[in-house]
Image (cartoon, helix red, strand yellow):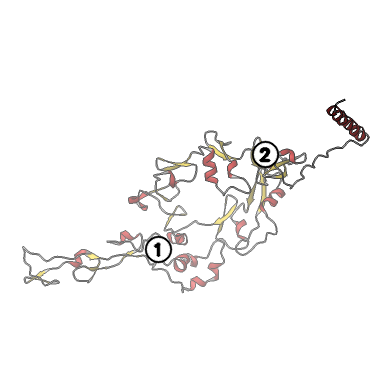
Amino acid sequence: MSLSSCFGAGAILLSLLAFMGCSGDEAQKVQPQSRGQRGEACQARNDCQDGLACINGVCSKNDFDLSVSAKHCDRVECQVTGDCCGDKPTEAPAKCAARASVCDTPNLPGCNQVAACTDDGDCDGGVCQPGRCSNSLGMCTSDTQCADTCLSGFCAISFQQCSDRLPCPSGVCQNRACDCSNPDYNRFDPICQDPDCADVCVLKCEDERCVPDNSCEEASDCFRQNLQICDAGRCVECVDDEDCDTGMGESCSPGGRCDKPCESNEECPFFHECQSGECVETGCRSDRECVLAAGEAVASADDARLLKCLPSELDPDIKTCKVPCENDGACGSQLQICDDGYCRFIGCEDNEECRAYLGLAEQMTTPERPFVPKAVCRE
């Protein structure tokens, strides 16, 4: 037998002996690595235990035992104005009628104090102050008071020679400005310290909320709102276009406000367009627009990059920005779950749930708020 044959046979024999020696040992088993529990780091879905999903690199619960309710929560403060006022009177005595004008309004509302003027009509309630004649510096209220007359061949003001063919040059009344001081204002008037006028409820019930009462009986009632027109019991900025700055294109809206028509989309809210001078809701146009408009302002933990421009549930012709989802865990807000493919607010089933949602606990009346708000769950 050759030397190479001996080596080959020896190698085979050693292999057989090694196999026989190992055959008696227990077979080795590879234990799989444990899957992540809730809150542990992950890279893929199957890194987490059953019932958890890998969301933003963390094993998180992806479905919750909650359903969306069609009901919503309302904060209810009143049914009638009396509910807003407690024991406070809702009307002040007659002696307090002009208190807002006397105590709180040093300047007349709507009057532009720096505006140039030629008469009182330019000052919106104020007085056009006298100016100075350009040729004599004398006080004047019109150009006619600055006229220079020719007397015995000499001008009365400039002393220049003059004649019928060479009249005296007349000056102009310049530097007239509006005086917007309120003539009734006197903060030292006793009415300003009268408790009968101070301890009055100035709230009214509107859409179940207690809001400031902006009603009026005369123009002076509107001064505290910086308005000067009382129209049909409400304080307004205008009643017709003439009350507005028509030179700037303003017109009086049905709500009694001077509005200037828009000229470009930049003058309108997001997802609105300027059409014929009005801002009209048109909805989003692309997913990118939703992302850029939301930026870092998306509620709770929602990622703006999840937003999609999709048809609205209320108006299919107008698209709105939504967060699509596959499971509850994909919704960043803890008050939303995945319903029909979109993250939606869970809603409510009873008033106590709404009380928790609105945080209405340990509510107490105060002199400024003599009522306790209620939480109501309704369709």
Q: Compared with residue 177, is residue 39 higher up or lower down, i.e. above or below?
A: above
Kindly report the distance in space between the C-alpha atoms of the residues bearing marks 2 and 1: 56 Å
Q: Quadrant of the C terminus?
A: top right
Q: Which residue is mark 2?
A: 338
Could you say which disc has been placed on residue 210 in the image? none
Q: Compared with residue 203, is residue 304 higher up or lower down, i.e. above or below?
A: above
Q: Compared with residue 171, is residue 275 higher up or lower down, i.e. above or below?
A: above
At label 2, counting other C-alpha atoms closer than 10 Å, the crowd grade (few under 14, some 14-19, many 20 or more) is: many
Nearest to the observer: residue 310 or residue 89: 310
What's under tag 2, amino acid-wise? Cys
Q: Residue furthest front?
A: 2
What's under tag 1, amino acid-wise? Leu
Q: Residue at image x 88%, y 31%?
A: 10
Dot 1 lies on which element? loop
Dot 2 lies on which element? strand
- Answer whether residue 232 is visible to the viewer in this image: yes
Could you say which disc has been placed on residue 108 in the image? 1
Q: Residue furthest top?
A: 1
Q: Position of residue 38 (x, y in %)?
A: 75, 46
Left or right side of 11 for 368: left
Q: Position of residue 272 (x, y in %)?
A: 47, 42
Place residue 175 in its image quadrant. Answer: bottom left
